[in-house]
Image: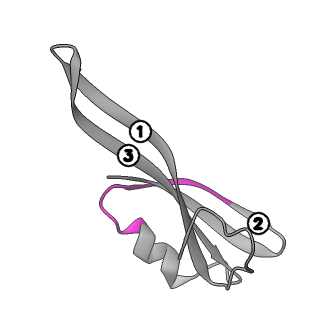
Amino acid sequence: MYFQEPSATQMQYPCIRYQLNDEDALHANNSPYSRSQRYLVTVITTAPDSDIRDGVASIPTARFSRAYVANNLNHTAYNVYS
């Protein structure tokens, strides 16, 4: 599991890469009272049908974003809200 993408090290596959993607605040009386973050969680595997995807997809706040292949690696991205 990597927070964002490592710059000096080679990632080991399969892996999960996540990064802060958005932040939202609810306001009342001109000040924020609730904040939430959205993370982009990307499962990167050599196999297109990895069980790791199912694990991330089962997170209650996970929403599928997209799937793509790059450099012969399968990427499945989810938005996960906290």
Q: Position of residue 19 (x, y in %)?
A: 53, 56
CB within 8 Å, label 1 to label 3: yes
Label 2 element class: strand
Neighbor class of circle 3 (other Cα within 10 Å; few <14, some 14-19, many 20+) is some
For the residues marked 2 and 1, what is the alpha-carbon distance in whole angstroms? Answer: 28 Å
Neighbor class of circle 2 (other Cα within 10 Å; few <14, some 14-19, many 20+) is few
User: As drawn, which residue projects farthest toward the front?
Assistant: 8
What's the amino acid at mark 3? Gln
User: Which residue matches tag 2?
Assistant: 69
Label 1 element class: strand
- The earlier-in-sequence mark between 1 and 3 is 1
- Residue 32 belongs to the span the image colors magenta: no
Q: Which residues are magenta?
A: 57-67
- The earlier-in-sequence mark between 2 and 1 is 1
Seen in the image, is 65 located left or right of residue 63? right
User: Which residue matches tag 1?
Assistant: 23
